[in-house]
Amino acid sequence: MLNPKYSLSKVPEVTLLFWVMKVAATTFGETGGDWISMTLNFGYLVSTCFFAALFAVALSAQLMSKDYKPALYWSVIVATSTAGTTLSDYMNRTLGLGYLWGALILSAILATGFIVWRQSAGQVSFSKISSRRSEIFFWFSVLVSNTLGTALGDFMADDSGLGFLGGWLLVTTILVLLVLLKYFTSVPRALLFWLAFILTRPFGATFGDLLTKTKEQGGFNLGTGYSSFVLLGVLLVALLVEQKNKNLKSAV
């Protein structure tokens, strides 16, 4: 039963604009996380603690809100992306787990979270948040999926031999396939959503690396700082459009 304290509008409608914002946010998470941890040389552990604190603050505000506030919701998404980037790098590089093992461990954590969520709430949803418990499970899944996506993206770009461009093209192809499955099959929409949600993170990770890495490394050498500000600008413009759409719907 729906908890009257929770509104279905606490989450945005999943449209093309949603995915544009998700890609911009996760790509910004890659470049922004690398900018703090690598370019500014704060290191993975300190950067993870910093972004985790930002995530905790943003999430607390989101949990206390009574309806969908675009700026707040997407602030949490960005926080999970940046925290996921540095956390994944800390696990896989500093702790020496490696991208493959890091991805496998995070996949197991995410799958366990989904199982517990389903047993607890009766369903794993992306469009209906009917209780505080479901909302916490939702954001836990977002954080883990963004961290997992970083590991997958780094694995494809570095260990698989595909490189940044090859990894990005592979993820893009899979995402196109998921779109086709949505429109031409009866595959559960929740499954397709979470697969796409996870894969937009390695899409952002590989695309972010493609933008920022040197030409010798196979990138465009735009730099983490410049790329981060450009991506943030794209996200802010999309956020203004989202807020305008929300205002128009509220006025109807």
Image: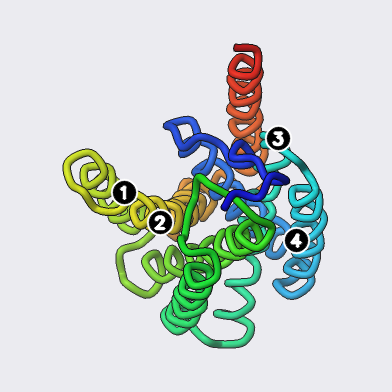
Q: Which residue is found at the position 58% from the left and 58% from the top?
A: 138
Cα distance, mark 4 to mark 2?
21 Å
Residue type highlighted by circle 4:
Phe
The disc placed on residue 199 is 2
Cα distance, mark 3 to mark 1?
27 Å
Mark 1–mark 4 CB contact (< 8 Å): no
Q: Quadrant of the C terminus?
A: top right
Q: Is residue 214 visible?
A: no
Q: Name above or below for residue 181 compared with residue 47.
A: above
Image quarter of residue 30: bottom right
Q: Which residue is mark 1?
A: 175
The disc, 4 or 3, on the residue closer to the chain's N-terminal end is: 4
Residue 148 on image: x %, y %: 49, 68
The disc, 3 or 2, on the residue closer to the chain's N-terminal end is: 3
Where disc 2 sits, the SS reads helix
The disc placed on residue 51 is 4
Residue type highlighted by circle 2:
Leu
Image quarter of residue 54: bottom right
Residue closer to the observer: 163 or 6: 6
Cα distance, mark 1 to mark 2?
7 Å
